Amino acid sequence: MLSPLIRRSARERGQALALTLHVVLLLLVLGQVVYLASRFRARVDMTSDALWTSTTSTRSVLAKLEKRLLIEAYFSPKDDLPLNMRGSRDWADNFLDEVTQLGNGSVVVQRYDPNSDKAVADKATRLGVTPLNLSSRSATSLSVDQHWQGLRLVYGGSRQEVVASFLPGSSFAAEAILTPKIKEVMVGEKGRFGYMEWPVAAPQSRTPSGVGWAACRSNEGLKKRYEFQNVKDEDGALLPDDLETLFLFRPKDLSDRQKYVLDQFVVSGGTLVVFADAAEYSVGPQRRMRNRPMSIDAQGSELAFVDMLRHYGVEWRPRLVCDVDARAYTSKIPQEYIGLQVRQRTGLAMNVPVPYPYFLHPVNEDWALLADQFAVDATGQVDARKAAQLRKTLQPGMPADDFLFQAFRRLNRGPGFYWPTWVGLARRAGGGLALPAGVDGRVLLWSSPRSLVEDPPQVLDPIGQDPRQWAGKSQQFLAERIARLRAEPRRQAPLMCEVKGRFTSFFAGRDRPRRPSEVAEAKERAPDKADVVAAGDEPAAAGPEEAEVGPQLAEDSVPAAMADERAMITESDRPGRIVMVGDATFLRDDLISGGMRQQGGPFSAYGLVFFAQMLDWLSEDRDLVALQTRVPTDRTLRFVEDDATAQTDPRDAEQALRSKTRGLVTWNVLVPSLLLAVCGAALWVWRRNQKRAFLASLQA
Amino acid sequence: MASRSLVVFRRELKSYFLSPIAYVFGVLFLTVLLFLSAQSTLVHNAQASMQAFFLYLPWIYLVFLPGLTMRLWAEERKLGTIELLLTFPVQPGQVVLGKFLAVMAYLAFVLLLTFGLPLTLSAYGSVDWPPVLGAYLASLLFAGSFVAVGMFWSSLTKDQIVALLASVVSLAVLFLLGYPSLIEFFGANLPPIVADALNGVSPFKYFQSIARGVFDTRDFVYFACFCGFFLYCNVLVLRVRRDSKG
């Protein structure tokens, strides 16, 4: 067989040796080429969702590594994993490989198998890596196996983070878990934010102080990078000078002193972020949606918070925005809406979301391009003049390229708001902007042009209490709004805005409101003063109502409580900033933690994402922005329409589905094979005929 | 060089389509591959993905391709046509390249017949076409590496069964070297450099890389080198044989 190569003559032995060397050298050279190609490589991710490409977030975080990042992977062998977990291991391995490559030598991955060494298992447990205890069953026994897939990240030998269980379901998930952890382990100093909140006194809440906004602040991932300090001081002390950003969660019952504190903060160059609500609607298991009394300004307050905001250039209308455009409220994210259990003909109970135009999203749509749709008159014709006017005035719903909204670009809509309010820029009667001198502003989110603005009605229940009437009531609820919309001009409602610049104090020319302790001190002095006044026939001192809140006349003598308070700043020496969002409910604890959902209410699916994004936006930390934008495309196969299966008998539907699937499989298997077989048979017949003809010609 | 390779290529390709082997091979290959993959791909509410198809494909190649390549040289030798071929004014390299391209063209044709599956998926779901097309390309490159090895073994012997067995065994070893379970085993029991080298040899790893939708220069360089190496060895065998005859 190999005789030419192994002939025994000396000359041929020499040739064989030379040949062997030739092949070995070639092998070495090609091996080297492949090695170099793996070192210096270029790759293009062809998947439309960029499944295999790390986002700029991961790259930017890894580019900032100054010290070595050691990733200890506590992974038990893949073969031991149950089949359904092996995919997760692939994603995990793939992402760790990519992180190692992107780290350019700064990232080292060390793998340990806790199942093979008890000391390693003990160490992993001590660190906080959690094994998965899964039972496996054989013919004769039932056992519980421990599977490990956790990580420990050590940065620079000192700081560490542990991922107790790293079980990504996709490359997106792997990145979303690991990259923030890497960022956390790298972060030295945390960003600091102050906050004040006015919890909702929910009647069914077990929390004595009501439902607040703690869940978004105490999110584990955010806590690692940011710290929040409650700066709501009952005595109305001015805010610390080193505080740069202050969040107000649903401000209400604001005293003039509190407004003064906020004013001084903004005038001093602080950033004030307000999540504002105009009403408190209850949802709860009854879903009656009754408006509970809520007032923005405290009783006795002489200055309105709305006026104060307008002074800075923000126009807040504490009225509700209702968006009747289906793009704004359609339940693409069903859990954001009230779900009603409807039993289908198939016998299955489905949670059907109730369309509710008061739960709306700003849509990533350039509404000006759709002006013709909104300029249709009663005859169904497009009113060209109206359309031209709308083209000039309509605004895009969301600036998707803005850093703050990049997380929402793929969703094509902004965060979901609940009973939002009008928050825009101050305007003159003629329509022009009325921003103070030296202040710039922009509206960040707009509703669709099919919006209604109204004072908060007492009840906004879309379905009523009778389950038999739910569907009808819901349609009627929506129809009423659409009918109202026909009678009103098309307009968009601003839902979020930002103003920044050098603000002047709202209290300039007014007296500084007194702190409660000052008022108390004044009360104590009042009898002495009354004596003096009585002796001199002067008017009596202010009554107790006046002493509560509101701007006060300057005292003759400075009370001890305000002795160390700085004088009022009337003009800003550095630019301040106000960001106002027309909704606070979407961030409320019960909506973002799912508590409300358990009671049949809505779940704010993207509230926390928006808040996290906002923190990064406010602190200009762009590192993790790209992570939020990753949403894989839905590629689900549907051989039969789900609606069709719902309409028919389940057995028929099942039969139809089976038949369709079988047909498709048969078609796909048989058609190509038969095609080739028929071609072969045709060729065989043709060749046979040719051969016969040839033989016949020979015989002839 | 190219025109002479083209002549060989045409001759070989014609011989494929004029002989029953192409049809028998094609029908069996398509039936088995599509039957297996359609079962797990065409599922209501599953993702419109060709993953199962490309998961089975390497195994099908492993079984079928040696059958296709075993006859390439062994039959020429058995029938004595190789001597005639080598007396033509063509270089062994041109003959090897012509034969190799003919097999590849035939395989491309057969793979083209499987396109009904992604088309069906796209009719009922949203198929991500770039990775699917990438995976088809990867399949062709992967097949190319198997064909190159099979041709090499076929050139060493005139017995087709020996060529078939040698091809199956060597391809199985190469294939399994890149198999995840074996990689883990090597990783745990061998020094890292040896484990990496063994893993780096297998075409399976590079196939998977392209098949998932990532075009990496490393993978293309690997396939070019792998095919180039075995085709070159094939040329050396022919040269030695020609020289020994001369």
Image: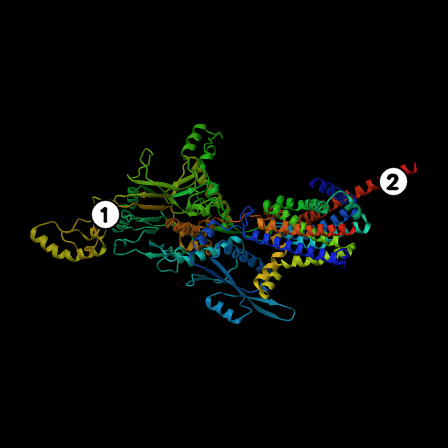
How is colour applied across the structure in the image?
Answer: rainbow
For the residue pair B173 and A616, the one nearer the viewer reads as B173
In front of the other: label 1 or label 2?
A: 2
> Nearer the N terminus, badge 1 or badge 2?
1
Quadrant location of the C terminus of chain A? top right
Given residues B206 and A545, the one toward you in this image is B206
Query: Image quadrant of residue B178?
Result: bottom right
Is disc 1 surrounded by few (<14), some (14 to 19) or many (20+) residues within 10 Å? some
Residue extending farthest right: A700
In the rendered image, the vertical position of residue A171 relative to residue A113, given as above or below: above
Residue A77: give x, y in percent of width and height. Answer: 57, 64
Measured in 3D between alpha carbons, the distance from the residue under mark 1 to the one under mark 2, in whole angstroms, is 111 Å
10 Å crowding of disc 2: few (<14), some (14-19), many (20+): few
Q: Total number of numbered labels?
A: 2
Q: Is residue A217 left or right of residue A141?
A: left
Q: Position of residue A503 (x, y in %)?
A: 28, 43
Q: Is residue A490 above or below residue B73?
A: above
Query: Could you tell me residue B101's position as x and y percent?
Result: 70, 45
Q: Quadrant of residue A694?
A: top right
Q: Secondary structure at mark 2?
A: helix
Nearer-the-camera pick, A541 or B139: B139
Residue A658 can be seen in this image: no
Query: Numbered disc 1: what chain?
Result: A
Secondary structure beneath disc 1? loop
Chain designation of label 2: A
Residue with the mark numbered 2: A692
Quickly name the residue at label 1.
A569
- In the picture provided, is A494 more to the left or to the right than A106? left
Amino acid found under the numbered disc labelled 1:
Ile
Picture quarter with the N terminus of chain A: bottom right
**What residue occupies the far front of the structure in this picture?**
A10
The reply to the same-chain question for discs 1 and 2 is yes
